[in-house]
Image (cartoon, rainbow, N blue to C red):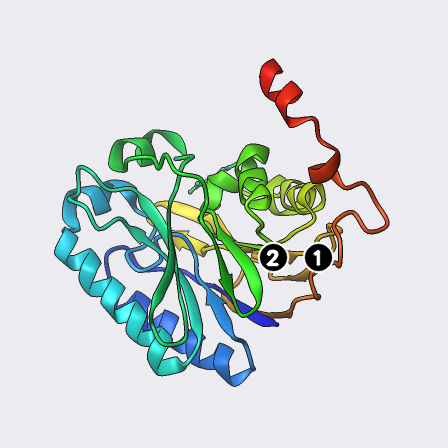
Amino acid sequence: MRIALMQHTARPLESEHNLELIDDAAARARAQGAQLLLTPELFGFGYVPAQIRAQVSAEQVDAVRTRLRGIARDRDIALVWSLPGAQAPDRRGITAELADAHGEVLASYQKVQLYGPQEQAAFVPGEQPPLVVSWGGVQVGLLVCYDVEFPEMVRAAAVRGAQLVLVPTALAGDETSVPGILLPARAVENGITLAYANHCGPEGGLVFDGRSVVVGPAGQVLGELGADPGLLVVDLPEPPEERGAGGADYLHDRRAELHRSWL
Ligand SMILES: NC(=O)CCCCC(N)=O
């Protein structure tokens, strides 16, 4: 299976411009044989939580979502996007959704681990575990940004059968430990592949790191980008016949009840 990750700089609240970037990335990804395109967190509006809360209506979110479904359909590629939820501005979270190449939404997930006071003031956290759906013969789970830094969140996707976890993100501040240490660890401890698509460059008062990456079940880097805009196209390895092949099978060996009683 071949997937693509879009890494770019969104323009705050300029959804027409941001959608054109996504459409262009979808066309280029499809031309390179990718079956899915993963895009960064809140890319349609830019990573500007306070401005989204104050200025983006539910109708505007719905219009952008409709356009994204159309891009998936018109470009004949599955698409993962991240938007504000469909609710009123004071009751919505940050979502990630997977649509198939017909533009049909297969999975929706609401970010559980909101990051920092800005996000917590602007959005409502999700309370549900990641939904895992079958797409292209692979069990796919969705998480958003900060979620993936918690072992519990990736484990929740893995115990629900996820083989591939797709993560729209918005990481700034030169946090090299996230793509460099945490993501490989999450992949190894669950025997899964993780794809992490970030913003890059100056946007909304922050400077995003880029460093989008795909990490395989042994923690191996299958593809990565630097600090500039780009399209990362990666051929995913076949999911391992059985987890832990050649190593520990943490999911099988863990003493979950005992661990739960300690935490
Ligand atoms: N949008 C986000 O969830 C940002 C998470 C950044 C976490 C970090 N370690 O800097």
Residue, x 23% and y 56% (percent of image)?
Answer: 13
The answer to whether one can see residue 172 in this image is no
Left or right placement of residue 128 versus residue 137 in this view: left
Residue, x 21% and y 57% (percent of image)?
Answer: 61
Quarter occupied by the N terminus: bottom right
- Could you give the CA–CA distance between mark 1 and mark 2, rounded to whole angstroms? 7 Å
The answer to whether one can see residue 261 in this image is yes
Left or right placement of residue 193 versus residue 37 in this view: right
Residue, x 48% and y 39% (percent of image)?
Answer: 146
Contact between marks 1 and 2 (CB within 8 A): the answer is yes
Please identify the residue farthest to the top as the structure is shown.
262
Dot 2 corresponds to which residue? 213
Q: Is residue 161 above or below residue 21?
A: above
Left or right placement of residue 97 versus residue 156 in this view: left
Amino acid on which the number 2 mark rests in the picture: Val
**Residue 78: x and y, percent?**
44, 71
Amino acid on which the number 1 mark rests in the picture: Val
Dot 1 corresponds to which residue? 221
Tell me the quarter of the picture where residue 3 sits: bottom right
Q: Is residue 172 above or below residue 25?
A: above
Q: Which mark is residue 128?
A: none
Please identify the residue farthest to the bottom as the structure is shown.
31
Towards the viewer: 131 or 31: 131
Which secondary structure, mark 1?
A: strand
Q: Is residue 66 above or below residue 211?
A: below
**Residue 168: x and y, percent?**
45, 53
Which secondary structure, mark 2?
A: strand
Quarter occupied by the C terminus: top right
